[in-house]
Amino acid sequence: MNPSCAGGDHAGVLLERTAVRWLAELVGFPHRPGAGLLTSGASMATVVALATARHQAFRDQGHDVRETGLYGHRPLALYVSAEAHSCLRKAAELLGLGSRYLRTVPVDAAFRMDIGELRRLIAADRRAGVRPFFVAASAGTVNTGAVDPLDDIAALAREHGLWFHIDGAYGTLGILADDAAPRYAGLERADSLALDPHKWLGVPVDAGCVLFREPGGPRAAFSLVPPYLRDEDAGELGWFSEYGTEQTRPFRALRVWATIAHLGRDGIVRLVQQTTRLARTLAELIEASDDFELLAPAVTSIAAFRHRPPTLDPDHAEA
Ligand SMILES: Cc1ncc(COP(=O)(O)O)c(C=O)c1O
């Protein structure tokens, strides 16, 4: 019950491969063996994704950032919405990219990234000699559950050669709710997706996950196998520790695997449909009430509102 899941040929590692594949299949993200791992949460999933994108951005220019670091290189710009989670900024700072180059894209009235503004910021950076390289969309923002226009962002990312990341820590599972699903169109086009089984799925903490379109990316960014760890029998995929920051890794897969095995796909769909419906019902009650104000459309399982009784209205006080 207490193995290290750095790698090796044992149940912990095999269950992690299964749990990661199940998560990808559940949300319709393309999965190739090795293209994902469990993490402590979305914050660490974001570090792994951003480090991989950073490594690839330099490699595309003929540089190995693992060798040279960021010294002497042109700054790279990242784009996140004004509603993005703070873990993106933390990861950018940690990886030496500098929060100065983290562009905050304004949002529309429904708290979704404004695609026109994104386009404008990318163009401004190009003119200023800063290299755009990474855009992170949110699929379920932490404040209101807003889902950014993923398809449009994917298209823009492709047009400009940007890495397309999705922070679906909380909200990826919303894709399983019939009426919310269309908002997730384009999710399958991401280069990386962070999602937290320890959020909507209800897996005990800690259980985060990062999925990649290509397994080679994270391995190129992280693999470092010293002689004492060399394993001739590691197989084609190598060890999980070659794909992320951790060497000794806990057996997170058991709780993820057990939760999915227990609920099954149907049970998870029911959970998501039911909680999404509850949020819609709450939003309707709020809209019908004089005392409360709905602050954003209820898209996922979040209904954001405030108490605003008419007696607090300045006009009411004057009358
Ligand atoms: C949208 C979103 N992204 C990232 C995170 C960070 O996740 P974690 O706390 O698992 O690192 C959260 C946590 O609330 C979140 O809601």
Image: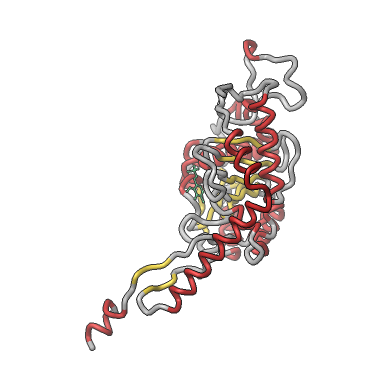
- Furthest toward the bottom, the residue is 319
- Against 319, residue 103 (above or below) is above
Give the camera-side residue of 169 and 93: 169
- Coloring scheme of the render? secondary structure
Q: Quadrant of the C terminus?
A: bottom left
* Residue 51, quarter of picture: top right
* Residue 49, quarter of picture: top right
- Against 227, residue 18 (above or below) is below
- Against 146, residue 234 (above or below) is above
- Furthest toward the front, the residue is 262
* Residue 45, quarter of picture: top right
- Furthest toward the top, the residue is 228
Percent of width and height locating residue 87: 48, 44
Give the camera-side residue of 35 and 77: 35
Percent of width and height locating residue 166: 61, 50
Residue drawn where x is 60% and y is 65% of the image: 116
Percent of width and height locating residue 197: 57, 44
Residue drawn where x is 69% and y is 60% of the image: 185
Residue 226 seen in the figure: yes
Give the camera-side residue of 171 and 22: 22
Q: How many marks?
A: 0
Q: Quadrant of the N terminus?
A: top right
Residue drawn where x is 66% and y is 44% of the image: 23
Residue 113 seen in the figure: no
Percent of width and height locating residue 260: 64, 43
- Against 61, residue 273 (above or below) is below
